[in-house]
Amino acid sequence: MPPIGTIAAPLRVAIVGAGPAGFYAAGALLKQDDVVVEVDLLDELPTPYGLVRSGVAPDHEKIKNVTRVFDKVAANPRFRFFGNVRFGEHVSLDDFRRHYHQVLFTTGAQTDRSLGIPGEDLEGSHSSTEFVWWYNAHPDFRERTFDLSCERVVVVGVGNVAVDVARILCRTPEELATTDIADYALEALRESKIREVVMLGRRGPAQAAFTNPEVKELGEMEDADFIVRPDEAKLDALSQEDVEAASDRLLTKKVELLQDVAGRTPEGKSKRIVLRFLVSPTEILDDETGHVGAVRLVRNELYRTEDGRLRSRATEETEELSCGLVFRSVGYRGVPLPDVPFREDWGIVPNEEGRVLQEPDGDPVPGLYVSGWIKRGPSGVIGTNKPDAQETVGHMLEDAENDRHFQPEHPSGEAAESLIRERQPQCFSYADWLRINDLESTAGEKQGRPRVKLTRIEDMLGVLG
């Protein structure tokens, strides 16, 4: 039998999850000069790119240019894409063991953390992910509805996703009409009655998770004033100590940006984005019809833990903020994968530098790997996934060289494709995606937009014939 990794016996790898982590890993595997690798990339959606397509805000088109890198990976003759294929439904881990030497999971963090407060299940209380996937034309979320008839929205959290939600709610229809936002979302936002979005941060300005470009953009909105309360923009003594000790130029700039906003006089634009600090929601209040009517807040103070970190704790000062819609954006977590070890407490697959472990401190499971958010948790930006993937791929190649992998009965591309197409006849190839991409882009060009997205799998199948 020829050695694994040769032309006669390529190293066969299945990657589950076609987002940046999956593509960066595929690229790292396929560029090897001394190992012949074949990569099959599977995703539950018909379209590739993961959060680049369904997570990046429509008014941030430049960020999506990274897909050009992914297209070059997909052009490799030893790469194949199988879209609209769900792991655990159409294919199983046992199936992979019969057809591949290794499996890499890059499924991300697919669900939101809850607030854990009363009233969180009221009508009008949503996760930010639902809203983001809705306006970005995710097929599974196009039927969601959001009551945009209220005047005030509360967004719990101050990360980049929370900023995206606030910004999209306050963009003018004319601005959104030049983006690739889903048509149904554009029409709903065109009729929106929202006039104020309040973002809530449980700690202070120095601990806010958003990046500087994001907060700077809020201060440049065409028809929305950006407001920060001067008393909340001022650093407490402990935060001031940390900022001075860190000597972090970006952190210092962030604080300066926020304090500059706090010193401005609102221009009287038709909408307002209000950024609050040191407040936490303790209850979402019913308007007596089962719908969100207000949020009860508590004022926080910061204290230093034994390990030197700053944490928030509630004071006795409270307030109520009337609103008709609440979006939580307080972090994300992965979901368990069938027959794959999982750490419920961390929301990730237990691993050591990408090698899946049977349990947190256990031995590696030969043939199983992770990369991206399902490996390290929801941190970093798109580019963070590249070195993360390279680390995992390095261990995959090392294990392949030392024969630590699955021993597949049928390690051929033809056998794997036959199984996948038998289980899911409506799977999509990369050629199918390129046809959809051309159709969307052509439709967008006619309207002065990057693309007009197809939002139903049935419609995608229809245009492909």
Image (cartoon, rainbow, N blue to C red):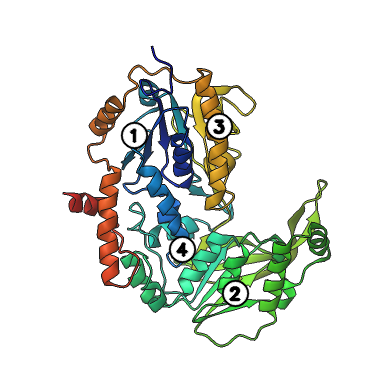
**Real-space Cα separation, disc 4 to disc 2, in angstroms:** 26 Å
Q: CA distance from mark 3 to mark 1?
A: 30 Å
Q: Measure the C-alpha gap from mark 4 to mark 1.
A: 35 Å
Q: Which residue is identified by label 2? A: 274
Residue 47 placement (x, y as % from top left) = 33, 49
Q: Is residue 324 visible to the viewer in this orientation of the structure?
A: no
Percent from the top left, x then y, of residue 186? 35, 70
- Work out whether residue 190 or residue 177 is closer to the camera in this orientation and state it: 177
Q: In the structure shown, which secondary structural element does the residue marked by tag 4 occupy?
A: helix
Disc 3 element = helix
Q: Is residue 268 above or below residue 203?
A: below
- The picture places residue 200, in percent across and down from the top left corner, at 62, 65
* Label annotation for residue 394: 3
Disc 4 target residue: 62
Q: Determine the residue positioned at 42% across, 37% down.
A: 16
Return the disc, 2 or 1, that comes first in the chain's sequence.
1
Instruction: Choose top left, top right, bottom left or bottom right for residue 5.
Output: top left
Residue type pointed to by label 3: Gly
In the visual, does 269 lie left or right of 149?
Answer: right
Q: Position of residue 7 (x, y in %)?
A: 37, 24
